[in-house]
Amino acid sequence: MGVVGGLIPSPLHFIALTQAASSRWMRTVLLLIGPPMLVDGVFLVITFFFYQYIPLSIAHYTAYAGGIALVVFGGISLWKAPRNNPEGKSHSWPMTRSSVSVATLVEVTAPGTWVYWLTIAGPIIAEGRMQGYWHIAPFFAGSLVGYYGAAFASVWLMAWGAGLHKDFNRYFFRVANALLVVLGALYFARSYFGN
């Protein structure tokens, strides 16, 4: 289950990619582990204590916020991208407190996060209350390994590709920012049309 979440592009992935392309691997690791672990920790606590009080429709409404946040993040990155030097990748997603905060906020408002915790993890945690938490531990351990493994592998492959091919490096950040805008629009459209 975690593999899909680790492969879906997010602003955190792209900020981490900027760090990986600059050979700042410790920062890359911290970006790929820290904010998602914080977000999942908060959702774990909320789901553990308040699962029965949270309406499932909240995932529908957070898709609006997540879509808007992705469109804004990708749009601002496209707008601020250097026009004369398309290889100036360090300007696309700098690792600043504000960019990491916004990227983390996008993680919180991503509909997939809410759907996972409310429709998949919530019932499994409820099952753990009845049958014991060691019974559900393998599920969560496998999800974590899948998520972080896929996230690290995808960022490493993109950084490797950027190092090998100048054309990839030249256009990747613009294409990736445009992809964030499209992904945000799809989040918004799916919520609006009720799919």
Image (cartoon, rainbow, N blue to C red):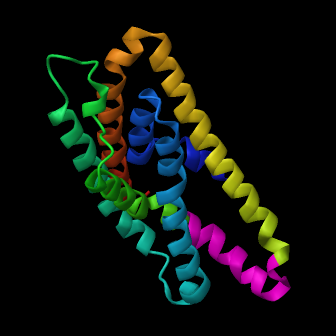
Q: Residue at x 54, y 45 (%)?
A: 29
Q: Residue 7 in the image: x percent, y percent? A: 56, 41
Q: Quadrant of residue 21?
A: top left
Q: Is residue 127 magenta?
A: yes
Instruction: Report whether 112 appears left or right of 184.
Output: right
Magenta part of the chain: 116-133
- Residue 109 lies, with reference to residue 131, above or below; the image says above
Locate residue 153 relative to residue 167 in the image: left or right. right
Residue at 37 percent of width and 10 percent of height: 167
Q: Position of residue 46 (x, y in %)?
A: 52, 81
The x and y percentages for residue 38 are 50, 66
Task: Classify residue 162 by image quadrant.
Answer: top left
Residue 165 lies, with reference to residue 195, above or below; the image says above
Is 65 above or below relative to 150?
A: below
Looking at the image, can residue 112 be seen?
no
Q: Dominant secondary structure of the magenta stretch?
A: helix
The spot of residue 74 in percent (x, y) is 27, 41
Tell how many labels.
0
What's the residue at 37%, 43% (across, down)? 183
